[in-house]
Amino acid sequence: MGIDVTDTSEVVILTVPHPRDLPTLVGRTFTTPWFTMDADRSARFEFATYLDSYPHPYGSEEDDGYGEDLVEGFHLLGMLDYLLNHVLVSQTPCTPWNYGLDHVRFVSVIRLTDRFRIAGTLREVVERAERGHLVVLDLVGEVQGREKPGFVATQRVLWTLAAANGGSPEKGREQSHV
């Protein structure tokens, strides 16, 4: 379970030498590797967010419910950082900060057995003076074998240089990701 690196033929990575070069990526698309949620981690998410402590209306599929193997929507959103770190890369150490979500819709159920990936477009880059660059991403959670996506979202991420966060670029990672 997790990232599938056996076939990366459809993966599209966007790389910039430095965050100041982010505007050159506006309009470009990217695609993450396929991913399958691990049942154990999903159960830990439900435990950590107290979803396991009350009877919820997931029910069985026969009762028009979602079934026990549903991947909760906020767990899917929590996976955005991890998945995007594989495809949005700065060669200069920087820190990407979650800045928010403007638009999220859970369009169809994603189950533990489903393979999904993120396809997206870098829509806009706004320079934030000394704070860095605000990157706006339009995202689609594609589900393998299904035309209808699992979810869609617009995410904002603030890319800041490591030195601007009290760290030193020399002490930063070899490559920094969103």
Image (spheres, rainbow, N blue to C red):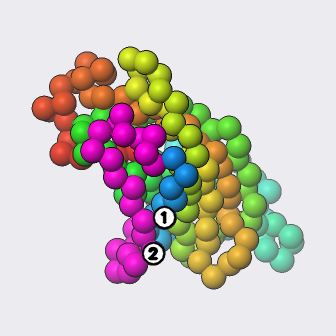
Which of disc 2 and disc 1 is earlier in sequence? Answer: 2
Say few, some or many: other residues with alpha carbon within 10 Å of mark 1 (under 14 / 14 to 19 / 20 or more).
many
Q: Is residue 19 magenta?
A: yes
Vertical side of 2 occupied by 45: above or below? above
Answer yes or no: do the residues labelled 1 and 2 have beta carbons within 8 Å?
A: yes
Q: CA distance from mark 1 to mark 2?
A: 7 Å
Which residue is disc 2 drawn over?
Answer: 10
Q: Which mark is residue 31?
A: 1
Q: Point out the residue furthest to the front here.
A: 24
Total labels: the figure holds 2
Dividing the picture into quarters, in which one does residue 59 lie? Answer: bottom right
Front residue of 119 and 6? 119
Q: Is residue 56 magenta?
A: no
Q: Which mark is residue 130?
A: none
Q: Point out the residue furthest to the left here.
A: 170
Residue located at (25% from left, 37% from top)? 93
Q: Is residue 23 visible?
A: yes
**Range covered by the magenta-colored residues:** 2-25
The quarter of the image holding the N terminus is bottom left
